[in-house]
Amino acid sequence: MDSNIVTIIVTIILSLIGFFIGYQMLRLEKNVKDIIDQIIERHKGDRSFRDKEFLNYFHAGGNIWLSAMDEKFRKMLNMQKYTAMGVILVAVLLIATDIASGVFYMAILPVLLILFVGRNLMNFKSVAADDKTNSRKAIEYYRKDFPEDSMAKNSGDSKAADKLAGWFLTAKRTCIQTGKLAKGKMGQSSGNQPQEDLPNRAARRAQKGHGSHAYPRGMRRR
């Protein structure tokens, strides 16, 4: 088989795999948002959840709150991040190979792949292993997503910083309690079978291409 044909086939296959990985990142982001929306709906009567700026803060830090439910979700996020970085590296190698093989037109695929996955990485919200770093990240994501909020603008002030620290504890505690409640309801409905955590459920459904059904039935809005 001609070497150029092999190069073309390899470029197409690896690029398609890379695009699929980027698509999974988008699906997971949507599933996290769906879960956060449903948690907000469930707690809309709580005082904190009647504050619009707190809701914006809560939305911005979705990955952090779901990671608080399950440490495995944080590890999965990190793995997804490094996988995406690996995709970009492979895309760069594909571009070099296509150019060296003289099939310049095929380099457009890995170029588009770098743009797609690179954009996902720029918007990626990582989660640290400690609360101090995550508290700082939550503010960073909040300021990025909702720069017009007064709390985001004044996050450097001591008074606002104290309030944001309280928001962090409230958001984390709410998600941990919600996760325990969801597991309890799922346990009641399925006996003694092992239960799947909410964050892992969101990740699994992202891989299968599902959308808004990442949340356990027992926790959905009635």
Image (cartoon, rainbow, N blue to C red):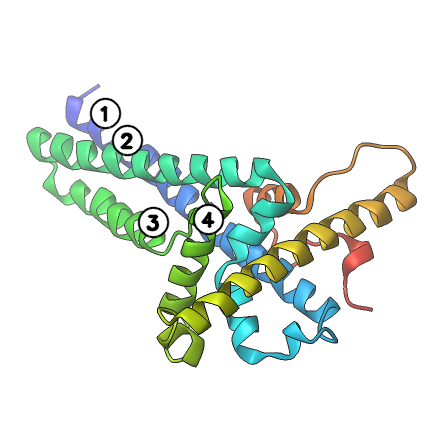
| Label 1 – label 2 distance at C-alpha | 5 Å
Q: Quadrant of residue 172?
A: bottom right
Disc 2 vs disc 3: which is toward the camera?
Answer: 3
The tag earlier along the polypeptide, 2 or 4, is: 2
Q: Where residue 189 sits: x, y (%)?
A: 90, 46
Q: Where residue 74 sits: x, y (%)?
A: 52, 40
Element assignment for label 4: helix
Q: Are marks 1 and 2 in contact (CB under 8 Å)?
A: yes
Residue type marked 1:
Val
- Residue highlighted by disc 4: 132
The tag earlier along the polypeptide, 4 or 3, is: 3
Element assignment for label 3: helix
- Residue highlighted by disc 3: 121
At a point 16% along the width and 27% down the height, the residue shown is 4
> Which dot marks residue 6?
1
Residue type marked 4:
Lys
| Label 4 – label 3 distance at C-alpha | 23 Å
Residue type marked 2:
Ile
- Residue highlighted by disc 2: 9
**Which of 168 and 194 lies nearest the eye of the viewer?**
168
**Which of 121 and 212 lies nearest the eye of the viewer?**
121
Quadrant of the drawing holding the N terminus: top left
The tag earlier along the polypeptide, 1 or 4, is: 1
Q: Are marks 2 and 4 in contact (CB under 8 Å)?
A: no
**Which of 10 and 2 lies nearest the eye of the viewer?**
10
